[in-house]
Image: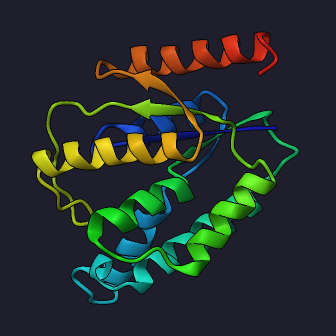
Amino acid sequence: MKRYILTGAPGSGKSTILRRLAALGYATVEEAATAVIAARQAAGEAEPWTRPSFIDETVVVQRRRQVRTPVDGPDVQFFDRSPICTHALSEFIGHPIPPVLTAEIERIARERIYDRHVFFVRNLGFVEPTAARRISFEDSLRFERLHEDTYRAFGFRLIDIPAGPLPGRVRKIRAAIGRLQAAGV
C-alpha cells in the first residue's frame, strides 16, 4: 500500500485534484482541518483555529481517517494533507506544537505510513475565501513556503505540481506514481 500526500498552499486546488483522483478509482482521504473548522462553525464558533486545542482536534481526525482507510482496497491512496501539514499550520498560526502532534509525527515516521515522496500542489496565483479559508494571497504564499520547509525538514521529497488546468495536474501525479512504481520506490 502506497499512501501519498497532497500538500500546498490553501486554495491551490488540492481538494479538486483529490476528487478527480477519487473519480479515477483511487482511494482518497479528505483534509481534516477543514472538517474540524466546519463542525465548529456549525456549532456557532466563528474562528475555531484560534484555540490551541484546534491542532489537537485536527490530529485526532487525521489519525482516525488514516487508520480507518482500508488497506485491502486500491494499492494507492491519496491524502489531502497530513500531520506534517498540521505541524506547519501550528507554527503558522502561532500555537505551540502539542504533544499529540509530536506523538503522531513520530508514529507516522516509525510505521512509515506515508510515502516519502509528497505531491506539492502549487498556488494558482489567487485564493478564493471560504468559511474555512480566510487567508490573503500574500499569507498563503508565506504558508506555502513554510509547508515546503517543514516537509523537507522532516525528510520528505517534494514532487512539484505546478499551477495549470486540472487534467494536466492529475496526469502529472499519475505519471509520477508510474515512475516511482517502475523504479520500485
Question: Looking at the image, what colour scheme do you see?
Answer: rainbow
104 or 1: nearer the viewer: 104
The structure residue drawn at horizontal position 31% and vertical position 81%, both measured from the top left corner, is 48
Image location (x, y in percent) of residue 159: 50, 24
Residue 4, percent from left and from top: 63, 37
Q: Quadrant of the C terminus?
A: top right
Quick check: 132 above or below 51?
above
In the image, residue 21 above or below residue 128: above
As drawn, the residue found furthest toward the bottom would be: 44
Quarter of the figure that contains the N terminus: top right
- Asked whether residue 101 is in view, the answer is yes
Image quarter of residue 132: bottom left
Q: Based on the displayed image, in which of its 4 quarters is residue 180 positioned?
A: top right
Report the residue at 31% width, 18% height from top. Answer: 165
Q: Residue at x 50, y 50 (%)?
A: 81
Instruction: Report x, y in % for residue 37.
Output: 36, 73
Residue visible at 43% across and 65% down in the picture: 33
Q: Is residue 127 above or below residue 117?
A: below
In the shown orientation, is residue 59 left or right of residue 33? right
158 relative position to 128: left or right = right
* Residue 19 picture location, percent across and down: 49, 39
| Residue closer to the observer: 118 or 70 | 118
Position of residue 123 relative to residue 59, above or below, is: above
Q: Residue furthest front?
A: 153
Residue 10, visible in the rendered structure: no
